[in-house]
Image (tube, grey):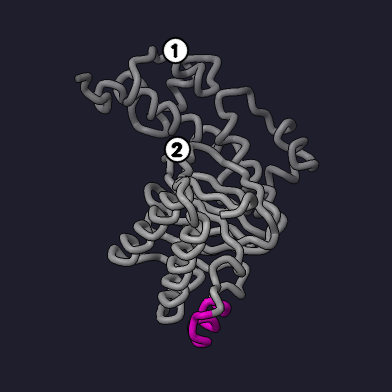
């Protein structure tokens, strides 16, 4: 593919902004875990086996859901690269119609997922090939991939699933949630969060509760306790160190919040859930 195109496998453990050319199309296939994509003014929720085609934006924002990492196949392409004129007019019309939307979401069946994964991997292997005509063959493989998706989309009754339109309040709340997920180990205050989105603390607190259904303090505690649960079950770190790593400077407060949210103390949770060492 040309220098403006890209093909890669992304392992997402936190939110990632990806720059793009407005003229290119972006293919995303979630292969493991769940996440969401922010494109234009819409958030698209995605589970494993979901495929998303996007177009017409300078950047997209990808994020895993909660603390579960997700794996995404990522491919950019240009319409004139994948539409050879020798295709029958019906095929050209089918693909052109498919690519006319700024976003398409397709949940794939097991069979379709295997086909799409294999076509993507063919593109990836050809793109890494140093032999003559590798670029041409990559475009051809990408064309087959997109034509297959276009045919699937044309015959599918499941379209644009799991999208959420952004209101200004939703945008603000998503930005705050993302910041908290990425910075839960650091001190977080309501005034500092309000500064991030250029508003006042009382307004942010009200908008966040209306958009998410929970208070900011509750969300911060939720994120921190989820991180602590992971560390308690997957590491040998001491409770005092885990508390600090998760943004709690006072261990008794950490113990109190942890028990309130899980029904167990951190020590009890660690004993019940720690994975055996091999």
Residue 77 lies in what quarter of the image?
A: bottom right
| In the displayed structure image, the side of residue 150 where residue 26 appears, left or right | right
Between disc 1 and disc 2, the foreground one is 2
Q: Nearer the viewer, residue 215 or 186?
A: 186
Q: Measure the alpha-carbon separation of dots 1 and 2.
A: 21 Å
Q: Nearer the viewer, residue 167 or 218?
A: 167
Residue at x-position 63% and y-position 49%: 3
Query: What range of the chain is rendered magenta?
Result: 86-97
Secondary element at tag 2: loop
* Residue ID for mark 1: 240
Residue at x-position 41% and y-position 78%: 156
Compared with residue 84, is residue 71 higher up or lower down, i.e. above or below? above
Q: Is residue 85 magenta?
A: no
Q: Is residue 88 magenta?
A: yes
Residue 161 in sight here: no
Q: Nearer the viewer, residue 216 or 182?
A: 182
């Amino acid at each position: 593919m040309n220098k403006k195109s890209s093909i890669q496998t992304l392992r997402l453990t936190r939110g990632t902004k990806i720059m793009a050319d407005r003229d290119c199309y972006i293919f995303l296939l979630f292969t493991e875990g769940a996440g969401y994509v922010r494109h234009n003014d819409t958030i698209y929720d995605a589970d494993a086996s979901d495929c998303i085609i996007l177009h017409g934006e300078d950047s997209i924002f990808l994020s895993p859901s909660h603390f579960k990492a997700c794996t995404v196949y990522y491919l950019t392409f240009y319409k004139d690269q994948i539409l050879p004129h020798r295709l029958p007019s019906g095929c050209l019309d089918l693909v052109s119609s498919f690519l006319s939307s700024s976003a398409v979401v397709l949940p794939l069946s097991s069979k379709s997922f295997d086909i799409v994964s294999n076509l993507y991997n063919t593109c990836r292997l050809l793109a890494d090939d140093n032999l003559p005509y590798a670029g041409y063959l990559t475009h051809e493989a990408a064309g087959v991939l997109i034509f297959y998706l276009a045919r699937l989309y044309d015959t599918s009754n499941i379209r644009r699933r799991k999208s959420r339109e952004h209101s200004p309040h939703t945008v603000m709340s998503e930005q705050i949630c993302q910041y908290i997920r990425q910075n839960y180990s650091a001190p977080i205050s309501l005034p500092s969060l309000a500064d991030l989105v250029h508003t006042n603390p009382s307004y942010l607190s009200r908008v966040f509760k209306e958009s998410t259904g929970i208070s900011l303090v509750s969300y911060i505690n939720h994120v921190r306790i989820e991180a602590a649960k992971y560390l308690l079950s997957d590491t040998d770190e001491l409770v005092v160190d885990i508390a600090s790593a998760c943004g709690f400077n006072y261990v008794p407060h950490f113990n109190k919040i942890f028990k309130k949210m899980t029904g167990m103390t951190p020590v009890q949770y660690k004993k019940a859930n720690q994975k055996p060492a091999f």
